[in-house]
Image (cartoon, helix red, strand yellow):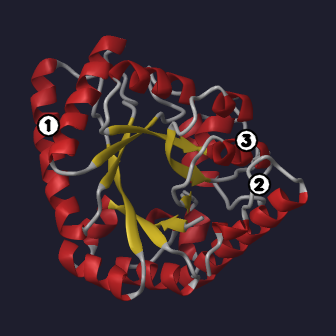
Amino acid sequence: MRTCMATVSLGGSLEEKIDAIAAAGFDGIELLDDDLRKSALSASECARRCADLGLSIDLYQPFRRAEGVSGREFRDVLSRFERELEVMHEVGCDSILVVSNTDDDADGSRDRSVEQLAALGDNAVEHGMTVMFEALAWGTHISTVVDAWEVLREADHPGLELVVDTFHLVSRGEGADTVDALPHGSVGFFQLADAPWKSMELKQWSRGHRCFPGEGEMNLLAPIASVLAGGYRGPLSLEIFNPGYRERPAHEVARAGAEALHRIVAALEDTATPAGDVSAWVSR
């Protein structure tokens, strides 16, 4: 299985992040839009740098306030989305992470969310791209994997796929049983993050205390095995929000992330999970 690391996990310039991720042996990156905007690299230069280092750009992220908005505002959403798709063309990425609305004024109509996400899916497909939809744990109306899957199931759109992030999954009390209940092949993108247990607001917990798998207190083995057993064959991606990590040298943190993936693979093999042969997760 291919491995991936989100650029938000590291400190430094985008160039330094790309170099560190490649040197640590990852196969691809999740590209943070703000990293690209602040970089001296253009989108096409970023694409060339990644290609020269053997890295794919597996996900462009995030696109916010995409659903649960008024019809008037949604016209602006579509305009913003089109601009992001143009950037993705330049950077050579065909998947965009769309996250659930977290604002207080989000419309709770499930039908509206279904309709608006389907419209984004239409636009994405026209450009040969895919929307990867993720429920943020602090989403106003869509905050769990079950919520996100229900929206996608109702939309029934070829341009929409489900993202599972272990932090969002476990922090909301979901787990392997949640993943097992999904139809085979439902997960389009899989992100890993651990964390120590904290009694605090979910967003603060997520943005300040994530860590590499096995370095926190969440039981991730069963959810990971369930995602793999459910037919997932995309990259296994580390998305770590942690200010302390970003203060350390990017190469050091990227190496630590790669080592954490090796350890989680070994643990899965030792527990004889139903995930099958996981030795190919780390390809280098």
Q: Is residue 36 left or right of residue 200?
A: left
Report crowding for label 3: few under 14, some 14 to 19, many 20 or more residues within 10 A (C-alpha).
few
- As rendered, which of 284 and 175 lies closer to the eye? 284
Percent across and percent down for residue 20 are 51, 83
| Label 2: element kind | loop
Q: Give the amino acid at mark 1.
A: Leu
Q: Is residue 134 left or right of residue 15?
A: right
Choose the circle earlier in sequence order: 2 or 1.
1
Residue 275 numbered tag: none
Choose the circle earlier in sequence order: 2 or 3.
3
Mark nearer the viewer, 1 or 3: 1
Residue 216 numbered tag: 2
Percent across and percent down for residue 114 are 31, 21
Q: Is residue 219 above or below residue 61?
A: above
| Label 1: element kind | helix
Mark nearer the viewer, 2 or 1: 1
Quadrant of residue 153 within the rendered picture: top left
Percent across and percent down for residue 248 are 59, 78
Q: Give the amino acid at mark 2.
A: Gly
Q: CA distance from mark 1 to mark 3?
A: 37 Å
Choose the circle earlier in sequence order: 1 or 3.
1
